[in-house]
Each structure stands twice: as C-alpha cells, then as structure tokens.
Image (spheres, helix red, strand yellow):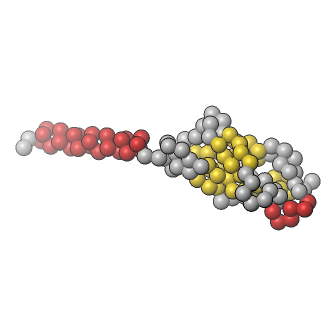
C-alpha cells in the first residue's frame, strides 16, 4: 500500500473513534458533583454551592435537597440552581436545642434523564453569634 493510503486509513479510524465517543457521551447520563464554599457559617449568614457535571460544566435549573438543623430524619428542604449551576442558602438558622445536629447537610441532586444523581458528603456547621 502507498504511504497516503496508510494516512487515510489512520484518519478514518480516528474519525470512527471520535464519532463513537461523542455518541456515547450524548446518549448516557453524565455524572455530577456538588461543591460547597464553606464548612462553617455564622448564624444568619449565608453560603453557596455549585452543581457541576463530570466535565466541570455547571448544571442549571436543577433541584438540590438538604437537611436543616434540627429537622427530623426524612424532612428535606429544596433549593434551585441558577443558570450558572449555583445555589445559595441564606439566613442560616442556629438552633440551641439541636446540639451536635446544628448543621446543614446531605446535599443531594436526584438526577434526571441527562444527569446522574449525586450526594455531597460535606456538612456546613452553624456557629452561634
């Protein structure tokens, strides 16, 4: 075979691989992760987080659920990500009778047909004023 034929064959193989990768990426759920900007926040303060996909792109307009201080197990609060994948929790509460459970935690994105769900293992502790 001529040298140009080898180059053409390699180029064709590369094209087939690229098409396969793009097809796989757009037809399978994309993993996600949540990042929080704080681990401690003062009472009545605020903190934020962001929901990103596996490629680091923000995931907009999705629901994030979490537990607030003193809430019983199974009670969740919801917030929405904005167009930049960010969400903000404002006016955080400190409950003196909550003891060691004075934190916001279990930040969860349930997932959908395009994105896999995820859970952020971090908690944000509320510090009294």
Residue projecting furthest to the left:
1
Give me the residue at 84% from left, 44% from top: 91
Does residue 40 appear anywhere in the picture? no
Give me the residue at 29% from left, 45% from top: 17
Residue projecting furthest to the top:
83
Q: Is residue 120 above or below residue 45?
A: below
Give me the residue at 50% from left, 43% from top: 113
Front one among 1 and 106: 106
Q: Is 70 left, or right, of 11 in this rendering? A: right
Does residue 90 appear anywhere in the picture? yes
When asked about the image quadrant of residue 69, the answer is bottom right
Q: Quadrant of the N terminus?
A: top left
Q: Is residue 124 above or below residue 46?
A: below
When asked about the image quadrant of residue 105, the answer is bottom right
Locate residue 93, reporting x and y percent. Answer: 86, 51
Give me the residue at 74% from left, 54% from top: 75
Q: Is residue 75 above or below residue 57?
A: below
Locate residue 62, reporting x and y percent. Answer: 62, 40
Locate residue 88, reporting x and y percent. Answer: 74, 42
Locate residue 81, reporting x and y percent. Answer: 66, 39
Front one among 129 and 115: 115
């Amino acid at each position: 075979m001529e040298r140009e034929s080898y180059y053409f064959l390699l180029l064709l193989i590369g094209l087939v691989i690229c098409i396969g990768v793009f097809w796989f990426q757009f037809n399978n759920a994309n993993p996600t992760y949540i990042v929080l900007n704080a681990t401690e926040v003062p009472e009545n303060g605020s903190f934020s987080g962001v929901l990103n996909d596996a490629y680091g792109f923000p995931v907009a307009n999705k629901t994030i659920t979490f537990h607030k201080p003193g809430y019983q197990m199974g009670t969740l609060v919801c917030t929405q990500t904005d167009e930049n994948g960010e969400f903000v929790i404002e006016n955080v509460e400190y409950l003196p009778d909550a003891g060691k459970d004075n934190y916001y935690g279990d930040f969860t994105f349930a997932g959908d047909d395009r994105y896999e769900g995820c859970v952020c293992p971090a908690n944000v502790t509320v510090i009294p004023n």
